[in-house]
Amino acid sequence: MLVQFSVTNYKSFRDKATLSLVASNYDKKVREADNVTAFENFSFRLLKSAVMYGPNASGKSKFFEAFNFVHHYIRDSATDFTAGDKIPVEPFLLDETSDSEPSEFEVVFLRNGLRYRYGFEVTEEKVISEWLYEKATKEIELFYRDEQSITTHPKKYKKGGMIAKQGFVRENQLFLSRAVQFNDEISETLYDSLGKLRTLSGLDEKGFQGYTMSLLEKEDYKGRILKLLEAADLDIEDLEVEKLDIDDLPSDLPKSLREFIKKESQDNDRSFASDVVTKRWKYNQKEEKVGFAHFSMDTMESSGTKKFFALTGPIIDTLENGYTLFVDELDSKLHPNLVEKIVSLFNSKSLNPHNAQLIFNTHNTNLLDSGLLRRDQVWFVEKDNCGNSELHSLSDFKKIRKNEALESNYLRGKYGAIPYLEFFNSFTSKFLEYENEG
């Protein structure tokens, strides 16, 4: 499970911003059984979900982009970065010093009863520092990197130490990622754990719809996907994956892709999905069922149906394997009540037995008064006068009554993180004045 994630000097975040999934004692009696998992050996409890609110351009998506950068850089730095390649990191550009300073990222997570703290500092040119700590009862340094100087724990990270001594790590590569290539067991375990922290863009379901389509090929997953669609009241009775006809490929496909599909089909007997067909009941004039009507997911279903269908695969996979899922703009195209139901899946002791986590941002303020969330699960992002994004939790506000109207108070600006729209009043007044003169 994810314990916390921190980012410093990346995109809109100049100062350190930390999202903590550690449950507060302030809310200890609120939805404790469902929303929280206790870890007695670490004397803390972890939340199963967290939501971020804030005005447009406040930095909500940039925070998710920071985590996405970490995920991809860990995965790709050892294989895709050759000598001299630029690291695709972007520092805070609205400060005269930060734009030339390194960006810093740190992830704290649990794996196999141990707590790990992994982080690094990078510029476009190189890794400035990198560290990994392990904690059972006390924290132990497994390795620390100062540019190209790497020190490792002599017993716990012995194989990694051999890799460091032989100089196999380039300045634009992460040591952890490089150690995985040499089959270091601890690095492989942590690499696998960090790979289970996943990010999705809720604005573009095409990026993960293919994954859901692949799950439809497995009968047990197909049944679960259909149950979710039924629960969402979409009237879909069945789903069928439509395959590409290799002898009649679309003419607008790029030539290289056409050749790849044909080669894979012929050499490896591989098929490619082109669409999903949804089936709904067809009725006669007596309202009796007489068969199925067929609809193309791509061309005939609503944008909300397509978005929810695409989400079902990652949601089921996350719940079944105890992963952590970051979703940017979860509420885009979805009804507020449906968003509530998705959140309730994760905030459930029975439906989420493996302690999967959902972290998302939204403009759906209905969630604040839904009773689904504790105060420590609600976070706000807003920018200061210098354009720096700041992150704070609702639990930071100590004088909040148990039955306080959180939604209306947030919209009134009590907790910050709302757009300042006073200019619209004067703008509208002036606009109407000019219009009347015309």
Image (cartoon, rainbow, N blue to C red):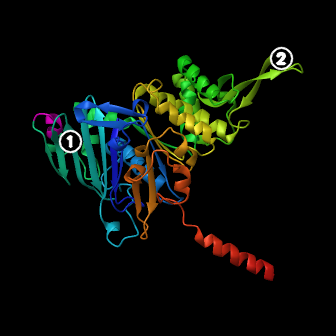
Q: Is residue 44 above or below residue 270?
A: below
Instruction: Describe the element under mark 2 as helix, strand or loop.
Output: loop
Residue at the far bottom in the pictured view: 437
Tell me, for residue 133, which label it has, or none.
1
Of badges 2 and 1, the one in the foreground is 2
Q: Is residue 162 above or below residue 241?
A: below
Quarter of the image containing the C terminus?
Answer: bottom right
Q: Residue at x 42, y 52 (%)?
A: 63
**The magenta segment:** 155-162
Instruction: Describe the element under mark 1 as helix, strand or loop.
Output: strand
The x and y percentages for residue 236 are 69, 26
Residue assigned mark 2: 288
Residue type for callout 1? Tyr
Left or right of 394? Residue 260 is right
Left or right of 227? Residue 117 is left
Tag 2–tag 1 contact (CB < 8 Å): no
The x and y percentages for residue 152 are 14, 42
Q: Residue at x 35, y 44 (%)?
A: 26
Residue type for callout 2? Glu
